[in-house]
Image (spheres, helix red, strand yellow):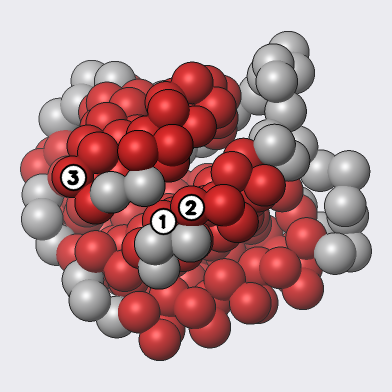
Amino acid sequence: MDRDAQVVRGREAARALAWTEAYEALGAADAERPLESADLELLAEAADMLGNCDDAVALLRRAYTAHAESGAVGRALRCGYWLCKALAWGGEFAQSGAWLARARRLAATEPGCPECAYLVLLEIELHFRAGEFTQMLEVVNRLPETARPGTDPDLAAGTTMTRGTCPSSARTANRPSGAGWWSRSRACTSSAGSSSTRWPRR
């Protein structure tokens, strides 16, 4: 099968949530010639869904860089969000923080970009982990009350969940409640990803 056919096969498999097939097809195409940024995101999603976390991180780094270099700030910030999350879930907190700083510098070049809210979600998590509930609530108020039309479904879900449950959890000022809130927030965005909305579709 030629490379273009592999790419098409991989995209179709990703739409069908056939992650093994998507990973194999897109991986084979990428080995022959580097994928375009959107297809890199699909391959990263497939890697993540199959538990290949190191591959997912490497692919997200490539996708972030490609989007940033092409001026696609919003798509780069979305990749940056999932990259920071993947690194943090893997215990690589220093690396996660470094990529967050990098994403913030990029966001500063286009402050009106809706995906800047992804970085707000990451900042909220940092305050949560530090037990800084007052600061966390202040940051929550920077999230939009309603999602704009066409907003990335994961961003809309994460924003809605955070604005709806974070304040009540923070008022109790204890870890069990906070942990419950954050696990629900993570589940919300994860469920969006599993329904094939986490990444752009081609």
Distance between mark 2 and mark 1 Cα atoms: 6 Å
Q: Indicate left or right for 114 with 119 as reference.
A: right
Disc 3 secondary structure class: helix
Element class at badge 1 = helix
Q: Amino acid at mark 2?
A: Phe
Q: Which residue carries the number 2 mark? A: 133
Residue 93: where, in percent of width, then height?
35, 79
Residue mark closest to the camera, 1 vs 3? 3
Residue 115 higher or lower than 90, as above or below: above
Q: Residue at x 28, y 49 (%)?
A: 174
Q: Quadrant of residue 18?
A: top left
The answer to whether 77 appears left or right of 153 in the picture is right
Category of crowding for the residue at label 1, using alpha-carbon neighbours closer than 10 angstroms: few (below 14), some (14–19), many (at least 20): many
* Residue 40 occupies quadrant: bottom left
Report the disc number at residue 128.
1
Residue 59 visible within the image: no
Residue 202's spot in the image, x, y percent? 51, 30
Q: Can the viewer see residue 62?
A: yes
Q: Measuring 32% from the left and 71% from the top, which residue is drawn there?
A: 87
Q: Is residue 185 left or right of residue 147?
A: left
Q: Are marks 2 and 1 in contact (CB under 8 Å)?
A: yes
Q: Residue at x 41, y 83 (%)?
A: 95
Mark toward the start of the polypeptide (1 vs 3): 1
Quote the CA–CA distance across marks 3 and 2.
Answer: 13 Å
Q: Which residue is mark 3?
A: 176
